[in-house]
Amino acid sequence: MTRPNLYVAIALSLACFVFTLIFFQNRDINLTPLTIFLTLLGCVYYGFSIVIGWLTLNRFSPKMFDRILIVGFLLYVIVKFYASVFVGFFYTPFWLFKNVKMNRH
């Protein structure tokens, strides 16, 4: 993961955390320190899984999508974003295990 990807993952995690806290306060959910910590952990996982899923899908994307019309490109980005959420959610633990195992030596 490159430095810009890391920044995007951190930004997505923080945005998720802020929106979740706003949602919790609007619903009058009791915000204990444990709730806040677990929410932060979930949002960090969610933010990083989107970036990891996007990078994983980049390996399978054909180069023809670089030259499509603007509407098609926007549709492509939206579909790829939702697919990266799904792929990243399941692939992130394997990605972490592989990278931690490789960097141990």
Image (cartoon, helix red, strand yellow):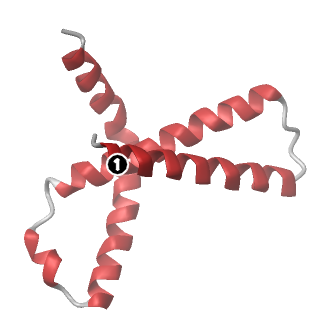
Residue located 25% across and 25% down the image: 99
Left or right of 97 on screen, residue 21:
right
Left or right of 38 on screen, residue 94:
left
Residue located 36% across and 30% down the image: 93
| Residue 67 % position (x, y) | 14, 83
Q: Is residue 90 above or below residue 59?
A: above
Left or right of 45 on screen, residue 63:
left
Residue located 53% across and 39% down the image: 44
Q: Is residue 71 above or below residue 1?
A: below
The C terminus sits in image quarter? top left
Outermost residue on the top side: it is: 105
Residue located 33% across and 43% down the image: 3
Q: Which residue is the site of mark 1?
A: 5
| Residue 51 % position (x, y) | 36, 49
Q: Secondary structure at mark 1?
A: helix
Q: Nearer the viewer, residue 1 or 80?
A: 1
The N terminus sits in image quarter? top left
| Residue 23 % position (x, y) | 76, 55
Outermost residue on the left side: it is: 63
Q: Is residue 95 above or below residue 71?
A: above
- Mark 1 residue type: Asn
